[in-house]
Image: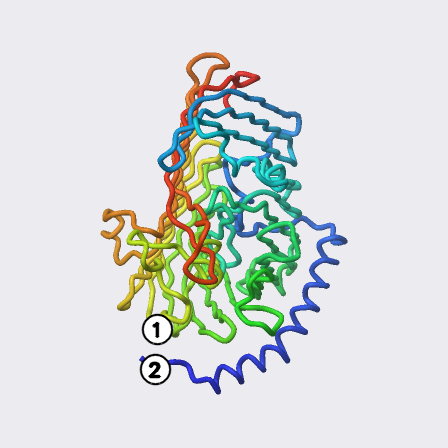
C-alpha cells in the first residue's frame, strides 16, 4: 500500500498557503459583515451543526411562553469502585430566544469528599451545562457549554466532536453560527481560551438570492473549513492543522423531500487526505411534526488520514492523549501515522419529532485490514411522565455485527432517566461510561482509562410540570 509521496505533500501544502488562506480570510470578513447588516431572512441551513437543533435544549416555540424550573435533592453516586452520597442542584430557564441550564453535583464518602467536584476554580464554570441564544429564523446562534455533537459541514473532519469524554476534565466550549441567504459562518472552540481546538467554516450560496423560479444553481453551496489545535498542534508551523473543501447542490425536490449530492475533499496537513462522495435526503418539516435526514456516502482515504478525526474521542485518544487498553500495557486504537489506506461507507439516519422524540444513528463502516469502523447513537423520548435519553459513541469496530460484541476501550455511553412519582417528586437515574485521567503516564502523553458511573437520585422539582 503506497504512501503519498513527500514531494506531492509539500507542493500541495505550499499551494494551500499561497491560495487558500488569503481567500479564506477575505471570506471571513465578508460573512461577518453580511450577517450583521443584511436584513433578509436566512434560508434553511443544516440542522446538524452542533446543538442548534438538540431537542433537550430547545428554546420556547411560543413568544409568550417563558418557563423556569428549579430542582434539588440527593442520593448516591458510584464512581469506579467507590460509593458516595451526593447532593444535586439544577436550574433551567427557557424563553423564545434563550435556553439556560445550570447544574451542580457534589459527593462525599467514607474517605472524604470527591475532590474533582471542587478542586479547582474552573469547576464553577463547569456548572454551565448550556447557555444558548437562538434568534428567530436561526440567523444568529450561539451556545456555551460542554460540546457533544459538534460537526462542520459534512463531518469529513469534525463530526460528533465532544469535550465531555472525560467528565471530570470536561471543558466549557463555544459554538456559533451567523447566516443569511448567501453566507453561513460556523465556528467552534473547545474551551473559552486562546489555547484550545478551534474550527471554522464558511459556506457560500453564490446564487442564493436568485429571484423567480428555483434552479439548480440557486441551491449550489460551496464550503471551506479549517481546524487548528492551539493547545497541542499537529505541526509546529502553519496557520491550521487540517482543511476541507466541499460542494453541495439540490438536484431533486418532491413533497418537501430534498436530494443533495455532495463531494468533499479533506486534508490533515503533513499527514494524509481523503475524498468523499455522498448524498443527503432531507425534509426539514414533514407534516409539521418531524424532521428527517438520511445520508449515504463513500470515503476514499490515503494513509495517515481518518474521516472525522476531530470527533467524540479526540480529547482522550488522538495525537495529544491516549486511552490505555484493558491489559494496561498499550493504548487503544491507532495513532494517525499508523492508519493505512482504505475505504469506508457512511450511513446516517436522523428522525426528530418536535419536542417529543429523537433518533440519530450514524455508522462509518471501514473496509480495510484495521478496526477503524465508528458508530454513534442519540436517542431521546419525552412524555408527561418521564424523560429518557441514551447516547453512545464507539470506535475500534469492524462490521455492524461487532456492535454486539464486548464494548471495548473506545466506548462512551450515557443513560438518563427522569420519572415523576407524583407532583414535584422525581426519581433521576444517570449511568455512563466516561474516562478518567491517570495520575502517571508511561510517556509524555496524558493517559485515560474507562470509568463506570451510576447516580440514582431523588429530587424535588418546581414548578411540577415536565420539561
Residue 345 visible: yes
Residue that appears at 52% across and 39% down: 116
Spatial CA distance of label 1 from label 2 is 8 Å
User: Where is 49 relative to 378, above or below?
Assistant: below
**Colour scheme employed for the rendering of this structure:** rainbow
The residue identified by callout 2 is: 2
Is residue 155 in view?
no
Residue for point 50% across, 76% down:
270
Query: Pointer 1 and pointer 2: residues touching (CB < 8 Å)?
Result: yes
For the N terminus, the quadrant is: bottom left
Would you name the residue on which mark 1 appears? 341
Q: Reading the chain from its start, which is encountered first: label 1 or label 2?
A: 2
Q: Is residue 258 left or right of residue 121?
A: left
Pick whichever, 190 or 125, lies toward us. 125
* SS at circle 1: loop
Q: Residue at x 53, y 81 (%)?
A: 12
Amino acid at each position: 500500500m503506497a504512501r503519498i509521496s513527500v514531494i506531492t505533500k509539500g507542493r500541495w501544502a505550499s499551494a494551500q498557503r499561497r491560495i487558500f488562506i488569503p481567500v479564506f480570510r477575505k471570506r471571513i470578513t465578508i460573512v461577518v459583515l453580511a450577517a450583521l447588516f443584511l436584513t433578509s431572512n436566512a434560508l434553511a441551513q443544516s440542522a446538524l451543526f452542533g446543538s442548534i437543533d438538540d431537542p433537550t435544549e430547545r428554546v420556547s416555540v411560543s413568544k409568550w411562553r417563558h418557563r423556569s424550573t428549579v430542582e434539588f435533592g440527593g442520593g448516591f453516586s458510584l464512581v469506579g469502585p467507590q460509593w458516595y452520597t451526593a447532593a444535586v442542584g439544577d436550574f433551567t430557564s427557557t424563553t423564545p430566544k434563550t435556553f439556560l441550564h445550570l447544574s451542580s453535583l457534589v459527593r462525599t464518602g467514607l474517605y472524604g469528599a470527591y475532590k474533582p467536584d471542587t478542586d479547582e476554580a474552573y469547576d464553577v464554570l463547569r456548572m454551565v451545562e448550556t447557555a444558548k441564544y437562538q434568534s428567530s429564523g436561526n440567523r444568529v446562534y450561539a451556545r456555551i457549554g460542554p460540546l457533544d455533537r459538534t460537526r462542520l459541514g459534512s463531518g469529513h473532519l469534525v463530526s460528533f466532536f465532544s469535550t465531555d469524554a472525560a467528565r471530570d476534565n470536561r471543558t466549557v466550549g463555544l459554538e456559533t453560527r451567523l447566516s443569511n441567504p448567501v453566507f453561513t459562518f460556523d465556528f467552534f472552540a473547545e474551551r473559552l481560551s486562546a489555547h484550545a481546538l478551534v474550527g471554522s467554516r464558511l459556506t457560500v450560496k453564490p446564487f442564493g438570492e436568485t429571484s423567480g423560479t428555483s434552479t439548480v444553481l440557486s441551491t449550489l453551496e460551496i464550503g471551506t473549513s479549517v481546524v487548528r489545535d492551539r493547545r497541542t498542534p499537529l505541526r509546529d508551523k502553519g496557520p491550521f492543522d487540517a482543511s476541507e473543501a466541499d460542494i453541495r447542490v439540490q438536484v431533486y425536490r418532491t413533497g418537501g423531500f430534498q436530494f443533495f449530492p455532495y463531494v468533499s475533499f479533506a486534508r490533515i496537513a503533513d499527514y494524509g487526505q481523503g475524498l468523499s462522495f455522498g448524498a443527503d435526503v432531507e425534509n426539514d418539516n414533514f407534516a409539521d411534526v418531524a424532521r428527517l435526514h438520511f445520508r449515504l456516502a463513500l470515503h476514499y482515504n490515503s494513509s495517515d488520514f481518518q474521516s472525522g478525526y476531530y470527533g467524540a474521542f479526540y480529547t482522550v485518544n488522538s495525537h495529544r492523549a491516549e486511552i490505555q487498553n484493558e491489559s494496561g500495557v498499550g493504548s487503544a486504537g491507532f495513532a494517525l501515522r499508523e492508519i493505512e489506506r482504505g475505504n469506508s461507507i457512511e450511513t446516517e439516519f436522523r428522525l426528530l419529532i418536535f419536542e417529543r422524540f429523537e433518533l440519530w444513528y450514524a455508522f462509518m463502516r471501514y473496509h480495510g485490514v484495521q478496526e477503524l469502523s465508528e458508530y454513534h447513537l442519540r436517542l431521546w423520548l419525552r412524555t408527561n411522565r418521564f424523560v429518557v435519553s441514551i447516547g453512545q459513541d464507539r470506535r475500534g469496530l469492524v462490521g455492524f455485527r461487532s456492535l454486539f460484541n464486548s464494548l471495548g476501550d473506545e466506548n462512551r455511553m450515557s443513560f438518563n432517566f427522569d420519572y415523576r412519582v407524583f407532583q414535584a417528586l422525581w426519581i433521576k437515574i444517570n449511568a455512563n461510561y466516561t474516562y478518567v485521567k491517570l495520575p502517571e503516564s508511561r510517556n509524555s502523553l496524558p493517559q485515560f482509562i474507562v470509568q463506570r458511573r451510576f447516580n440514582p437520585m431523588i429530587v424535588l422539582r418546581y414548578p411540577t410540570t415536565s420539561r
